[in-house]
Image: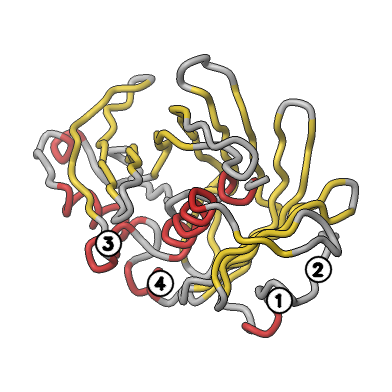
Amino acid sequence: MGHGKAIFGVAAAVALAGCGGPAEQEAGLTADEVIARHVDAIGGAEAIDALENIRIRPEVIEPGFTIFGDYRATREGRVRVDIYAGGERMFSEGIDGDGGWQQAGVGAEFVETTPIARQALAHGIEFNLFGLHDLASRGHRASLFGREEIDGIDYYVLHVAMEDGFERYVFIHPETWLVDRYREVSALHPDIDAEERPAETLQGNFRESCGVLRATETRKVDRETGEEIQRTRAVSVECNLDPASLNIGRNEPATPPA
């Protein structure tokens, strides 16, 4: 299914009142300067670097169905996503010490995840537990693509190139330094359909967890058709939990959402 990767491929962002007036917008900031302002706004590098793990329980709404998820990830590169419908666990996938895996329901056989699905899971770890300031040290790159005006806001646009070839265009608000939206070409559910399509994700309702502000609501739109293809709402966000409570391995018990 691959619902988990589509839910949380987001960089942390925050609204910080009073930053970035017109003079600053005209200053011709570099990519490093834009990233520095963004990182300071969301809580600072120290707070981001202190994140050891994260657990997000989202509601996911798509045309025709609503599901709930339980996403857990660690800075060491382990991740697990459990998907529930009607209170029943319908699908699970993750990356553990033995590699990428997936399971189509309780009691089903564990199988190796597809390369594109494993890649998407890995990207989720990068965007949920690391900051834009970490990109270079982790083998990725960010460059200033330019400015683009949308709805009267002249965004800074960063081109993020991951070491595996994946690309994302991140739109940073010139006054709040929020990551208001991002664009990429990807598969919404790579385990079902590997077709990659251009999409834009709008982010909102920023809240703090462990000293870092992040979007808790998203709306994804197909850029070719203009149709909304997914909405998400984080019911809860927790971080730096006792690792033993995450049950992140493939053979560990899942915890159904309340």
Question: At which x and y percent is residue 121?
Answer: 52, 56
Numbered tag placed on residue 247 in the rendering: 1
Amino acid type of the residue tagged 2 in the rendering = Thr
Numbered tag placed on residue 255 in the rendering: 2
2 or 4: tag closer to the N-terminus: 4
Per the model, the C-alpha gap separating discs 1 and 3 is: 29 Å
Could you say which is closer to the camera, residue 101 or residue 43? 101
1 or 2: tag closer to the N-terminus: 1
In which quadrant will I find the N terminus?
A: top right
Q: Tell me the residue that label 3 is attached to.
A: 133
* Label pair 2/4, CB-CB below 8 angstroms: no
Per the model, the C-alpha gap separating discs 4 and 3 is: 12 Å
Question: At which x and y percent is residue 101?
Answer: 63, 63
Q: Element type at marker 2? A: loop
* Label pair 1/3, CB-CB below 8 angstroms: no
3 or 2: tag closer to the N-terminus: 3
Q: Is residue 218 left or right of residue 69?
A: left
1 or 3: tag closer to the N-terminus: 3
Q: Residue at 16% of width from left, 41% of height from top? A: 24
